[in-house]
Amino acid sequence: MKVKEIKTPKVAFVRSDDSIKQAALKMEELGVGALPVVVGEDVVGMLTDRDIVIRTIAQGLDAETHKVADAFTEGVVSCKEGDDVGTVVDLMEKEQVRRVVVKDEQQNVTGIVSLGDLALNIQKEMAGEALKGVSQPV
């Protein structure tokens, strides 16, 4: 099975200069726990609900004035649409991530593959192994 068959195709982004509150409201509206962060046209990282809690709320910072740029996790783990699902599972385990950005041959973002996507679309054993591998302490 290929990544393009299981990815979540609609990707919403958040800009690095958006406020944390704007990002949190977008997450709530979309029912997601993570959004890719863009600077200009480039995806530069991922903002998760955990990032918001740890890097903003727990630090006593104001979510209305604190920016995404100050809270997101830098770096993007990505794969290609044509990659085999097993390759993505291995990548998630290796990089210790729960979401991988999917790109086409021109490097445009076309979706995201999450552990949830794996659980819904592949054999339970493979999804369980991915979760186990991602959850291992480094």
Image (cartoon, rainbow, N blue to C red):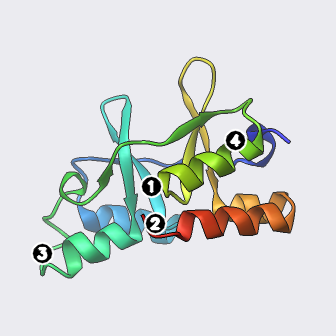
Task: Name the quarter where the C terminus is drawn.
Answer: bottom left
Looking at marks 3 and 4 on the same chain, the residue that comes earlier in the sequence is marked by 3
Q: How crowded is mark 3: few (under 14 residues within 10 Å), some or many (20 or more)?
A: few
Q: Residue 77 carries which label?
A: none
- Secondary structure found at label 2: helix
What residue is at 74 percent from the left and 29 percent from the top?
Answer: 82
What residue is at 28 percent from the left and 68 percent from the top?
Answer: 21
Q: In this view, does 125 lie to the left or right of 65?
A: right
Q: How crowded is mark 2: few (under 14 residues within 10 Å), some or many (20 or more)?
A: many
Q: In this view, does 28 lie above or below 46?
A: below
Looking at marks 2 and 4 on the same chain, the residue that comes earlier in the sequence is marked by 2
Looking at marks 1 and 2 on the same chain, the residue that comes earlier in the sequence is marked by 2
Are the residues flagged by discs 1 and 2 in contact, CB closer than 8 Å?
A: yes
Q: How far separated are the C-alphas under marks 1 and 2? A: 7 Å
Residue kind at label 1, given as amino acid type: Leu
Q: Mark 1 points at which residue?
A: 35
Q: Quadrant of residue 93?
A: bottom right
Residue 44 in view here: yes
